[in-house]
Amino acid sequence: MIRNIVFSTTNREELIDITERVNAIVKESGIDEGICLVYAPHASAAITINENADPNIQADITDALDKIVARGVWRHDKVDGNADSHIKASIIGSDRMIPVKDNRLMLGRWQDIFFVELDGPREGRKVIVQLLPASRDKP
């Protein structure tokens, strides 16, 4: 089963909690056990899992990325000025796999799933969620 989540972003860099939307897709799937793949099909965005209880974590993540990857100093910046976004997206990664058990994501107590916008604001950002059921054949 594959579903899309589509939304707009409001800032150049931001983390958007998509956990509840992914959970709803898992519930809809009816899959008792398997894997949930969450994928961002964008070259300047990413997917991560981290804490959501303290919003400072989200700001710390974007601040740390800004310290690691400078803006405006890369060859690609001559094309459209967003090379840092591409590099940051490569560092974080475009997907995450989360185990599913009892028709629920097996996230830790403090974990949520975030879409990481690195070149916003953008309209029509998409996340692809694919549910892969566990094999019914057991060794």
Image (cartoon, helix red, strand yellow):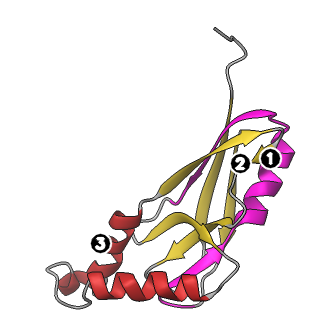
Tell me how far mark 3 sits from mark 1, CA to CA: 33 Å
Residue 87 is labelled as 3
Q: How many neighbours does mark 1 have within 10 angstroms: few (below 14), some (14-19), or many (20 or more)?
A: some
Label 1's element?
A: strand
Instruction: Tell me which amino acid carries mark 1.
Output: Arg
Residue in the foreground of this view, choosing between 18 and 81? 18
- Whether residue 136 appears in magenta in the rendering, the answer is no
Location of the N terminus (image quadrant): top right
Q: Earlier in the sequence, mark 3 or mark 2?
A: 3
Q: Magenta region: which residues? A: 11-40
Q: Which residue is mark 1?
A: 104
Q: Position of residue 69 (x, y in %)?
A: 27, 82
In this view of the protein, can residue 121 be seen by the observer?
Answer: no
Dot 3 amino acid type: Ile
10 Å neighbourhood of mark 3: few (<14), some, or many (≥20)?
many
For residue 78, the mark is none
Residue 83, image quadrant: bottom left
Residue 70's spot in the image, x, y percent?
A: 24, 88
